[in-house]
Amino acid sequence: MSSSLRKVTLALMLVVILGSFAAVGWAKLKDNWRSTKSDQGQYLALGLAIREGTALTDGNRHPLYPALLALFAEREWAYFTKAKMLTLAIALLGLVAIYWMGHRMFGQDVALLTALLLSVGYEFRRHSWMVMCEVLFIILFFAAWYFTVKGFSKGRCSADHRSLPLDLQSATSKNVVYRYWILAGVFAGLAQLTKGSGQLFAIAFLLSSLLLYGRRALTQKGVWTFIGCYLVVTSVLMAYNYREYGNPLYNFNTTHAMWLDDWEDSYVASPQELPTLTSYWQNHSPGDIVAREREGSGEAWLVLILALIPAHSWYMRDFLYSGTGLVTLLVGAVGLGYLFRERLSLYWKGNRERIVFSLVLFILFWVLITWYACVTPEPRLLLPLGPIFYVFLAEGLCGLGRWVGFRLAGVEGRLIPTAYAAFYIGLALWVLSLSGEATQKNPSANPFELDRLRNAYRDGILAWLSEEAQNGGTVMYGPSHSLPTWKYNDLFTFFPIPNRVTWAKLSTYMEGHAIKYALLDGETVSRRQSLFQGYFQALGEEKVDILALPGHWELIFASEEIPCQYCIFRVNGLGPDERWRVAVGCSFDQEVRLMGYSLQTDQVESGQVDLALYWQVLRPPATRYDVLLKIINTSYKVWGQQSEPLPGPFLPLEWVKPGQIIKDRREIELLPATPPGSYSIEVHVYSPSAERWLEPEEGCDILLGPVQVSRREPPAVEDLDLDHPIGAVLGGRVRLLGYNIESGFRPGDGIHLTLFWQCLAEMEQDYTVFTHLVDGEGRIWGQKDNPPVDGLYPTTEWEVGEIVRDQYDLVIPSEAPPGQYHLKVGMYLAETGERLRMVRGDEPLLENVVTLPPFQVHR
């Protein structure tokens, strides 16, 4: 095959690799909609913290990747979508960068195979569309390895040139070598800024320097150049860690997590309970340590397989993890080693530094994963070794291909080029087959819209809580992390439920953190079964059934009813800093006591009165009470009312204990066109079991408030609850829009009349409204004359365009005979008795009176 055709073939193959990877990534990016899966939520939260200037690291995740997220961080779902796109872009650029470095160091074939193997690796693919640092870490780690190997290789310039990397055959100047050490230190530092396990690279470098240089390591300028550049790059993180944690090298995983026996033990009531190296050695025998390493070795082998196998190669995973597969692999490796022992000997001589450094890296990671496997056997821990392993594997495959080609050199001349092309065509078809299924799913769906819609339900849970606790607070939630807490951590502080605690210790924990709310789901309850036994039962990991309520826990929200997917409780009835602002202390027939209340504001501008009532249950309730709240003025007219059960619908009656305090949040809508002024809230309690209204104890004031209702924008006429429109104009100053009327229309019954006025012009005089009850012969049987709103809102205070609701109560006399009656309405000036001239349309009204349609009074 000609050189140009070979280059074209390899270039096309690279395009296929990148295109397939991008297509799969774009499709899988849309499938990854749970922002809290794995550590995604923590990275999103750290990105927000960096943008808001509140943190550089959370003590576990390092800042470089979150700093990139901070460039566009916001508390919206678009942030999550953009973060996934950023990771995918980093992965694509990383494949190109690894190909470029491999091409310069090992040649085009090795570079292409390395990029291909990495692109189809299951774990690399999976993390390429997640909001996590792994992909960035892999790329920086490989770049650090590449330049470190370049630096170490300077001593091999006199070795057999056939075993040297291609671009080192002419690069022998010291300036070039120092450049490699500078870049190696910089990229190693950047890897450390990305992930805590980047420290292993620096440790491997120091150990390899000692192995390769011996005592001369301390005199090597390249070694000090690497160390200096590494320290400069990581200095910001080390300074921050020293200030925040008292240790420049602090990382939660290395300081605490790796000394855990189980990951659940990381959820502690106090940080002082977390294990350290010292406490671990004090509490474990040498036999425990050996047993842990032996058990971890089996887990580590599986982790290694998962970290390196191609996507969907589960048959390969099962085979390699089996005893047969391991024996086959070892026998094959020994056989190939023996067959190519001479070539391997030459390879060792020409690449000793690279092999030593890579082996040291592998051993360090292997020791780490065997120790850490019992805590969290995560394949991503070994991902940084992936590209390095693939380089050696690609070199072996290419070497094997050259050996086969050399053996077949005397056969048909076109066989080798044909086989070469067929090999890459086969690889291309394999790569395309891996991407076929993924690219058929949601090909044109908008990822921004998908993320928003798919997360709407879980987002709504925390949105509801933010409405309930408008000033924020502390929430006990976790170890489950299925809710997008990163969107709300500016409003709430979330504390997980500790492991291995009693109720007494949990109560102390909650009091110490001033917990206001507890949020439970199936996963949390299943992971804390011993704690919640007798109170809550997990139905799988999806729902929670409530068997009984712990003392002073009040259920205030249950998604999808009970059993609930998410249950929210108000803890201790009242939060530690929550008290009613106004004490009442009024009991209703010794069944419930209104302890007090709090108004959100005593100046109402929104048309809605928000308040919280605090009730104490005095005896076990037989049924739910109905609590009726009425907004009234000084003449006891009702301007809005609301009725809700007590306790609320989420709290079963059998859980209500005497002495328990229940917070009862209410929102009372004012009637449309309620005039501005001072109002009170009247409280009534009805007992359905007794079929009567409960009487407040003597001397109780059941009027809450006052609240001041401000003048608001007038409602549209069509939005009024107006039953009978009229449209009469009085003196060009006022329009009577219409009226509502309520009555039983029998002698002795009351008539409740509501008039709706609209101010057309400013009025300099106070007018009086008259309402007369008149029979068919014109005799007056009842009347009410007073300024509007019982004199509380005179016409001189009205503004042009304002609509005023005006209520009147008349009584049909008990002696009134049956027959036809009607109401007459108008306005006059009290000083002179002169009525305002009234017209409807262009027609003047007789006697300047609006006569409402007649009604029949019956016995």
Image: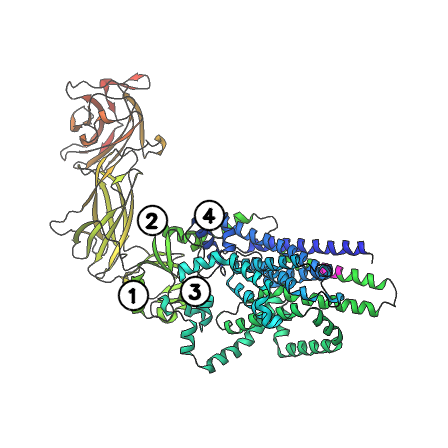
Give the Cα distance between marks 4 and 2. Answer: 20 Å
Q: Quadrant of residue 168?
A: bottom right
Q: Nearer the viewer, residue 330 or 534?
A: 330
Residue 427 magenta-highlighted? yes
Q: Amino acid at mark 1?
A: Thr
Q: Nearer the viewer, residue 855 or 624?
A: 624
Task: State yes or no: discs 4 and 3 in contact (Cβ < 8 Å).
Answer: no
Residue 98 magenta-highlighted? no
Task: Give residue 307's position: percent from left, percent from top.
Answer: 59, 67
Q: Which residue is mark 1?
A: 508
Give residue 470's mark. Answer: 2
Task: Give residue 467's position: percent from left, percent from top.
Answer: 35, 49
* Label 1 secondary element: helix
Disc nearer the start of the sequence (4/3): 4
Disc nearer the start of the sequence (2/3): 2
Residue extending farthest to the front is 219
Give the Cα distance between marks 4 and 1. Answer: 35 Å
* Label 2 secondary element: loop
Q: Which residue is mark 3?
A: 523
Residue 177 placement, left or right of 296:
right
Local crowd size for mark 1, using a 10 Å CA cut-off: few (<14), some (14–19), many (≥20): few
Q: Which residue is mark 4?
A: 74
Vertical position of residue 227 compared to residue 285: above or below: above
Task: Give residue 75's position: percent from left, percent from top.
Answer: 45, 48
Where does the magenta region start and end?
A: 424-429
Local crowd size for mark 2, using a 10 Å CA cut-off: few (<14), some (14–19), many (≥20): few
Disc nearer the start of the sequence (4/1): 4
* Label 3 secondary element: helix
Residue 362 shows in the view: no
Residue extending farthest to the bottom is 287
